[in-house]
Amino acid sequence: MPRLRGVLETALYVTDMARARAFFEDVMTLTPFTADHRFTAYAAGPGSVLLLFQQGSTQETVTLPQGMGTIPPHDGAGRVHLALAIDRDELGDWEAQLAAHDIPIEGRTHWPKGGESLYFRDPDEHLLELATPGVWPNY
């Protein structure tokens, strides 16, 4: 049987790309490695990419240049959830980073396997989670 190697890309759909980029770059300290009017891509850890798409801008097939192929339409709406892995010893630093940007922590969970999670919202009301090891059997 073939096996999966992991989740490569995760996408959030945003209503205001400039506002979303400011949040993910200033608060979450991510650096974009490519962007245009309809999307921004960030490295979100080894082998993981966070994509921000302008809501409604990906409803048509995209034809890539030089015969590279096509990307089928997709879109999303609503308040979705995204968990980001962090080191246990950086949990306090992340709490301070969120506080410095006046981002309220909506929830905190202490998991049975020893992991901790902090929950907060981005400007589009997506629920973001910062999670230390010990949340899942494989993390």
Image (cartoon, helix red, strand yellow):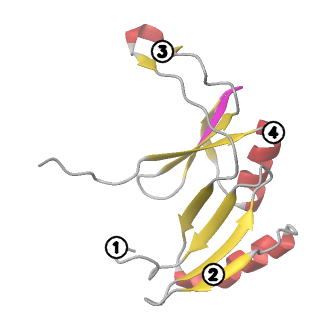
Specify few, some or many for label 2: CA neighbours under 10 Å numbering under 14, 14-19, or 20 or more: some
Q: Which amino acid type is marked by label 1?
A: Asn
Q: Check residue 38 for magenta coloring.
A: yes
Of the two numbered discs 3 and 1 on the same chain, state the one appearing first in sequence: 3
Q: CA distance from mark 3 to mark 2?
A: 40 Å
Which quadrant would residue 76 be assigned to in this image? top right
Quarter of the figure with the C terminus: bottom left
Query: Residue type at mark 3?
Result: Leu
Residue with the mark numbered 3: 64
> Distance from label 2 to label 1 (Cα)?
19 Å
Residue 121: mark in rendering: none
Tell whether label 1 touches label 2 (CB within 8 Å). no
Q: Earlier in the sequence, mark 1 or mark 4?
A: 4
- Residue 18 is marked as 4
* Mark before the other along the chain sequence, 3 or 4: 4
**Secondary structure of the residue carrying numbered label 2:** helix
Q: What span is colored magenta in the figure?
A: 36-41
Measure the alpha-carbon separation of dots 4 and 2. 27 Å
Locate residue 100 relative to residue 128 in the image: left or right: right
Residue at 55% over, 29% down: 74
Pointer 2 residue: 91
Tell me which numbered mark, 3 or 2, is placed earlier along the sequence. 3
Expressed as whole percent of the image width and height from the top left, the position of residue 41 reads: 58, 40
How much space separates mark 3 and mark 4, taking CA atoms?
24 Å
Q: Eyeballing the image, is 84 above or below 124? A: below
Crowdedness near tag 1: few (<14), some (14–19) or many (≥20) residues, C-alpha within 10 Å: few
Residue annotated with mark 1: 138
Does residue 77 appear left or right of residue 101 in this picture?
A: left
Precedes in sequence: disc 4 or disc 2: 4
**Comparing marks 3 and 1, which lies closer to the viewer?**
1
Task: Give how far apart the Cα atoms at labels 1 and 4 are.
Answer: 35 Å
